Amino acid sequence: MEIKINNVNHIYNEFTPFAKKALDNINLSLESEKIIGIIGKAGSGKTTLVELLNALIIPSYGNVQVADFNIQKNMRLDNINKLRRKIGLVFQFPEDQFFNPTVREEVSFALKTFSYKSDRLHKQVSESLKLVGLDDNYLERKVSSLSGGEKRKVAIASVMVFNPKVLVLDEPTVGLDYKSQKKLLHLLKKLRNRYKKTVIIVSHDVDMLNLIADDIIVMDKGKVVASGTKREVFKNTSLFEKYGLNLPKIVEFIGKVRKEKGIKLGNHTDVKDLIKDIYRNV
Amino acid sequence: MQLYGVVYMNNIIGINSLSFRYQSKFIFEKFTLNIKDGEWISIVGPNGSGKSTLVKILIGLLESDSNIIVDKLTLNRENIDKIRKKIGVVFENTEDSFVAETVADDIAFTLENLAYDPKEIGRMVEDIAMEFKIDDILEKEPNFLSGGEKQKVALASAMVARPKILIIDDALEMIDEKSKNEILEILNKLHKERYLTIITITQNLEETYKTDRMVVINDGNILIDGPTINVLEEDKIFNRIGLSLPFMVDLSIKLKLYGLIDHIILDMDEMVNALWK
């Protein structure tokens, strides 16, 4: 399912003294079945951009095309509901999106609003919990008793349960310990590879994105200042300097070795592979 | 210089067999830690390890009956106001702590709170602003600053009354790399030139690189305590408690295993030059 963002400008509180331009003439097309990372400083418009994708925000000007849906002013409400089954959004703080007491009710909530039948509902809830690595023992657990990592998983399960084609996550690894992070990254790769989903991740953690993203979009002051494959974008070191962003450490290291010693190491994302390459080259 | 040596040997903070319970669960049980005057120490551990509870106890936000000494004063209700003057703190979410309409007023607020002479306040605010290079934003509204600027202002507010101890509680997590390095450089200067005692509380091992000593805690227990550069090599401990190894530490440990380097190197330029002389 292709996503096209056409000439989008978004202004918060337009026509008031508090008007603030959050998106400035955005044109993008996002490929399907990819993991796409969006980076940029705080206030660069990353979150606004992804909130457009499921019509949480309707652009002030321009439009967003998601499959057959056209997100723009005057979009019909029933179309918005249909669109939201296709695009699942997991917020930065999953606590903010819980409003049911137990895991079962939380995960089945979306299905009920989308009026699924109850026999199918139970199966779907179990399956999506399994997908994120939680078993049926969690069904009756109180949401408030879960750890940070478990909450994040329940938030993802409650979005995956209606089987969206696109999953959008805002800062998914913040506050997660290393083990939970690794499991989450494994899950996101599985969603792309086995379930053919598009995964869009907003994050400041470029080292994490370097491990799993296919494509990278760089934003600054409401504009897209670079987009392309991970390799293309990370190759442009001066861009990162210009916008005060950091490169993945491993990319920085490989770049430094090439620049200062004239030695070409491969574009590794894993330290183990890098070590072998260094061993061959010293 | 001899005097400095003597001062350095004294404990500025002594936590003696601290026990602290939240509801019925022990967060700390017989926890002992001494911090020397002029030391830069990092206390690291995963979520829920007790790091932030420890900070709250030290600044009197949580009460304990245990024996804690801060700069020769016993931590109790009677002394808490004096002790708070000795400790500056920067927290993670500084947005919540801004109270005034301009940066200058916000920094002054700390001094007003501590009942400084109003005549002195203006000068002290200017001095600290120059020192931390935020003199150009003194008239700005705190909420319109970037994340990095906000943390610098918070640091200036914490330091303006010249405390003897500074606590950085997870305060560098969400800011950009450039601001983070600038702040770490300011801290390094305060530590080296003024012998400020600094306590860095974090889960991010990169923030510990410049510290003298590292204490790793989990479930209220000290797992290891030693010179930072040595503790960073304990990858098995970090793996076990779920802290990720920064790239340079990970790379160093593996290169050492291959015999390509003989010690941990945290600086990237130094590493490149060590490998290809």
Image (cartoon, rainbow, N blue to C red):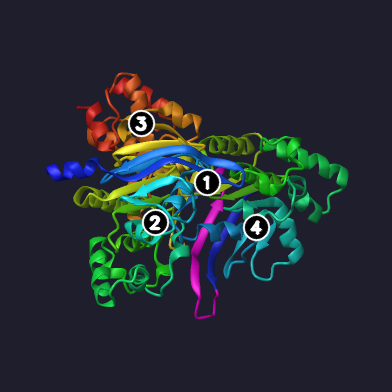
Would you name the residue on which mark 1 appears?
Answer: A175
Q: Is residue A195 above or below residue B148?
A: above
In which quarter of the view is residue A76 placed? bottom right
Would you name the residue on which mark 4 appears?
Answer: A54
Give the magenta range. A13-37
Query: In the image, what residue occupies the spot 24% across and 52% down?
Result: B190
Residue A109 picture location, percent across and down: 77, 52
Q: Chain of mark 3?
A: B
Q: Chain of mark 2?
A: B
Residue A273 picture location, percent across and down: 41, 26
Kind of residue sitting beneath label 1:
Gly
Q: CA distance from mark 2 to mark 4?
A: 37 Å
Q: Taking B44 as reference, is B25 left or right?
A: right
Would you name the residue on which mark 2 appears?
Answer: B90
Residue A107 picture location, percent across and down: 74, 47
Q: Chain of mark 1?
A: A
Q: Residues within 10 Å of mark 2 (few under 14, many from 20)?
A: many
* Residue A166 seen: yes
Query: In the image, what residue occupies the spot 29% across and 77% down?
Result: B118
Q: Nearer the viewer, mark 2 or mark 1?
A: 2
Task: Using the rendered image, report if marks 2 and 1 lie on a common chain.
Answer: no
SS at badge 1: loop
Would you name the residue on which mark 3 appears?
Answer: B231
* Residue A248 seen: no
Task: Using the rendered image, report if marks 2 and 4 lie on a common chain.
Answer: no
Q: Chain of mark 4?
A: A
Q: CA distance from mark 1 to mark 4?
A: 25 Å
Q: CA distance from mark 2 to mark 3?
A: 25 Å
Residue placed farthest to the left in the image?
B1
Magenta segment includes B168: no
